[in-house]
Amino acid sequence: MKFEVGNKVLFKKDNQKGIVIKVNSPYMYTVLTDDGFEIRVSIDNLVKVVSGSDKINSYGTIFSSKESNVHLRKSKKNQKRKNTLKVDLHIELLSDNYHYLDNFEIVQIQINECYKSIEKALNSDIYKLEIIHGIGEGVLRNEVHAILRKYNLRFYLSKDGGATEIFL
């Protein structure tokens, strides 16, 4: 449906109406809402109001059901975001007698802890896993990234480079 400047419109996903004030492209319009806000909106999210039927219920109940589904999805998404697991691989936190271990044994303990935490995250409702490996020379970081590649997980290095974030 083609809109022109001055057309009254209803938003499909929100219980709002407004007037088209600018045509940005054939698929994007700027709408001035009844609340006084200018919003850029895709053509897919608008319905042209025919004169004499400017009430939302004139266009069916599709709008309200879409709106309620959107709110349900958002609440589930917010619930997922709360489920994060933070694992610190510093050897001081993993072993009491780390002073008697050589470097190879220390890295093996850290790698085993990394595997355990990844398995725990994958087998539960955890949304985000943060593995703190430290900055150092990058030996442990490279091992952690190699493990994550085996699992085909997307990961991001933190700003300081001392941790890796994994979104499951």
Image (spheres, helix red, strand yellow):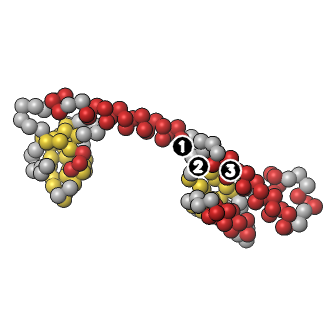
Q: Where is residue 65 in the image (x, y as percent from the top left)?
A: 31, 32
152 or 144, which is in the foreground? 152
Query: What residue is shown at x 13% (from left), y 49% (from top)?
Result: 1
For mark 3, does the 10 Å Cα neighbourhood hold few (<14), some (14 to 19), or many (20 or more) residues?
few
Check disc 3 and give the amino acid type: Glu
Query: What residue is shown at x 83% (from left), y 62% (from top)?
Result: 106
**Quadrant of the image occupied by residue 102:** bottom right
Q: Where is residue 167 in the image (x, y as percent from the top left)?
A: 56, 53
Front position among marks 3 and 1:
3
Check disc 1 and give the amino acid type: Arg
36 or 10, which is in the foreground? 10
Query: What residue is shown at x 72% (from left), y 55% (from top)?
Result: 115
Q: Is mark 2 on a helix, strand or loop?
A: strand
Using residue 8 as the reference point, say whether residue 151 is left or right of it.
right
Using residue 20 as the reference point, say whether residue 117 is left or right of it.
right
Asked whether the beta carbons under mark 2 and mark 1 sit within 8 Å of each other, the answer is yes
Q: How much space separates mark 3 and mark 1, taking CA atoms?
A: 19 Å
44 or 100, which is in the foreground? 44
Pointer 3 or 1: first along the chain: 1
Q: Does the rendering let one see residue 85?
A: no
Pointer 3 or 2: first along the chain: 3
Q: What element carries label 3?
A: helix
Residue 81's disc number: 1
Q: Where is residue 39 in the image (x, y as percent from the top left)?
A: 25, 47
Residue 119's disc number: 3
Residue to which mark 2 is pinned: 128
Front position among marks 3 and 2:
3
